[in-house]
Image: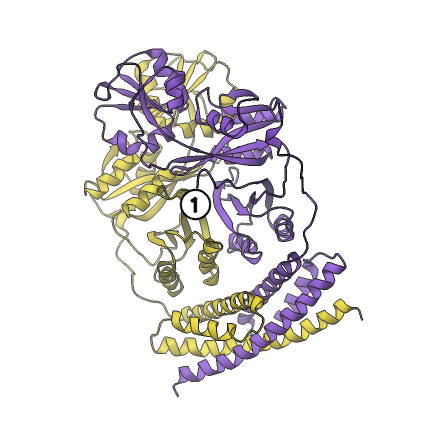
Chain colours: A yellow, B purple
Amino acid sequence: MSDIEQYRRSIDDIDKKIIELFQERMEVVTKVARYKKENKLPIYNGNREEQVIEKNVSRIEDDSLKPFAREFILSMMDISKKYQSVELSKDEVSSEYINEEKPFYVEKDLRLGYQGVNGSYSEEALLGFFGNKHKTSNYERFDDVFKALDKDEIDFGVLPIENSSTGAVKEVYDLLRKYGFFIVAEKCIKIEHHLLGIEGAKEEELREIYSHPQGFEQCSVYLNNLKDVKSIPYFNTAISAEHISKEGIKEKGAIASKRAADIFNLSIIKEEISNEEDNFTRFIIVGKNIINNASNNKISVVFAVENKAGALFNALKWFSVNNLNMIKIESRPIAKEPWKYFFYIDFEGNIKDIVVKDLLETFEKSSSYFKLLGVYRRELDVCN
Amino acid sequence: MSDIEQYRRSIDDIDKKIIELFQERMEVVTKVARYKKENKLPIYNGNREEQVIEKNVSRIEDDSLKPFAREFILSMMDISKKYQSVELSKDEVSSEYINEEKPFYVEKDLRLGYQGVNGSYSEEALLGFFGNKHKTSNYERFDDVFKALDKDEIDFGVLPIENSSTGAVKEVYDLLRKYGFFIVAEKCIKIEHHLLGIEGAKEEELREIYSHPQGFEQCSVYLNNLKDVKSIPYFNTAISAEHISKEGIKEKGAIASKRAADIFNLSIIKEEISNEEDNFTRFIIVGKNIINNASNNKISVVFAVENKAGALFNALKWFSVNNLNMIKIESRPIAKEPWKYFFYIDFEGNIKDIVVKDLLETFEKSSSYFKLLGVYRRELDVCN
């Protein structure tokens, strides 16, 4: 038998014993979970965990092995904790946070705000989610929508957070954190960009095209094939349509929606010029309070970690430990601390779940910055 | 003694035995590491790992415990592997990849490209890194710089990748992945935005200010306090300066650098109007080949994972397992697959290190998409 085979046999013998002990440990841990459940004690006990780790690390003789032993024990305890959580949540549901009233969006006479003008995709998202029975106000900038919420001029704001081909709307991420308001719902809209012009305008006669920079990005393939045409970045797609409508010159076009063409009396020169056939923008509905409901299944948080090796990984570990599915991670700079970041995470869950409550508490304790940004229902039907 | 104390004693007895076995396992694992080293065998053996996991999971009787046992064994093997790596890399250094020639940037007569015009921050970064002895070409769009590299019109391109207050330049992230070129260096520039006007222009008489949207974002605090002034988004800061210089109207201002003021013969109406005093942009130097050097200590990669729970976490685990420090994570949408993402990660290391080679191989095998984006030296002196 070769040396390596010999070693592998030893490892196998060791593993057999370890796995038996692991099984025993999990049995006792289940008993602890039951006991804690009956006595309404929290699963997580930081002090006790620290003690267990220290005691076991001190049992290791070789100093260079100690950090590995620490990681091993930590990982074993994480798995124990996850197992406990699963056992506990099998039959218990906390009633805290639950709000079983009728959905907030069916209330009458809400005051709603969005960025952009009549005919914008934001307005489309607002009407798609709330219907057209409410009072709506439009604002020039994203910040103005948050300010309006802050001053109680509106009950909810509708803001784009992410496009499926160009990515995050980073300004909205920053404002959400800055104002500390909450996502209460999401609404997805299919973006269909068309090339618009005044009546009689022709593709080959165009010299200037107006749109939001994201409009140009999303139609870059089509635009790159046009000759002698200047792309002029403008405030947003609908304002671009309004602008060329007012100017009334055949040489000026705009990239905007069909709705904008109708509103500003423009013709469609070329239909559907987006690079991707499936181009969606996800909007968030933002309010001043958390509105939880048993059917909510998505949570958004933002956090920062100490600037040291492994800190981000250690934070993300809690999602894995608690078996919670991360849907999205987005990073944004911390302006006053160059090259440090806020991490925005969307994950599946409801804050009434014990594992989720546990995760949020752990995060709050262990991060250098932490904010809950929203609890809502994941919209899958329309856009995915 | 209470029930819970009883349980804790049992757990402690079990832990004591487990930790002894862990110590034994690590001793054997060290022997395996030495054997592999002497016989030039790879550390990672996927088949053997699979066998060990399956054998041990099958030893568990309770089905509901099996997934937890799997995680436990996986984690123990990860720690073993990390320990092996550390033991191996203690005295061995691979000589592969090392390029000990003189640094590429001291070569003469390089052909260099950047986006923007004379007077732009990109040009400043280029001159700061390469000096002014080379032939430079400027291009209208980021994509044009990549195209020029592709056509061999230039040897290296200089492109902004990240600003310390406004975040990632997402288009450059996308293009880097799309073209498959490599980051060979980074250069950080302090951004000092000034309000420029033609001679005699005054702050209170301005009606329009031109700049790149990022210029507006980075000076939003100052701009929000101005009255009756329109912000007009323009191609970039230097072109904005050129534009108002050509127009020659006192009511038009631009946000740009001091260098742009000098080049386009403009006055500084108001100095340093950025929101943050410390505002930096990190530029990357992009070439068609990997240029490694023993002093390189930073690596960039991009990858995608299967769309299932825990997949991202499992990928990130490899950095922790190999004790590699993640510097930055950035996510970008996969355009053709709505709500799926590419993850861009910068981490510390040199591709000659065994742990890094190991990590890259593992990533390549286990990701649904993977590309090495660059190996370079982290610039800490100037901008951090």
Q: In this view, does B31 lie above or below A239?
A: below
In percent of the image, x 66 and y 62: which residue is there? B50
Chain holding disc 1: A
In percent of the image, x 68 and y 58: which residue is there? B43
Q: Residues within 10 Å of mark 1 (few under 14, many from 20)?
A: many
Quadrant showing the N terminus of chain B: bottom left
Most foreground residue, A259 or A113: A113
Q: Using the rendered image of the protein, determine whether residue A267 is visible from the camera's viewpoint.
A: no
Residue B246 lies, in percent from the top left, at 36, 11
**Residue annotated with mark 1:** A330
Q: What is the tally of numbered marks visible in this picture?
A: 1
Q: In this view, does A180 lie above or below A33?
A: above
Q: What residue type is labelled 1?
A: Glu
The kind of secondary structure element at disc 1 is strand
Residue A235 lies, in percent from the top left, at 34, 26
Most foreground residue, B36 or A351: B36
Residue A129 lies, in percent from the top left, at 32, 42
Please state if A100 lies on the left or on the right of B54 as rendered: left
Residue A167 lies, in percent from the top left, at 44, 38
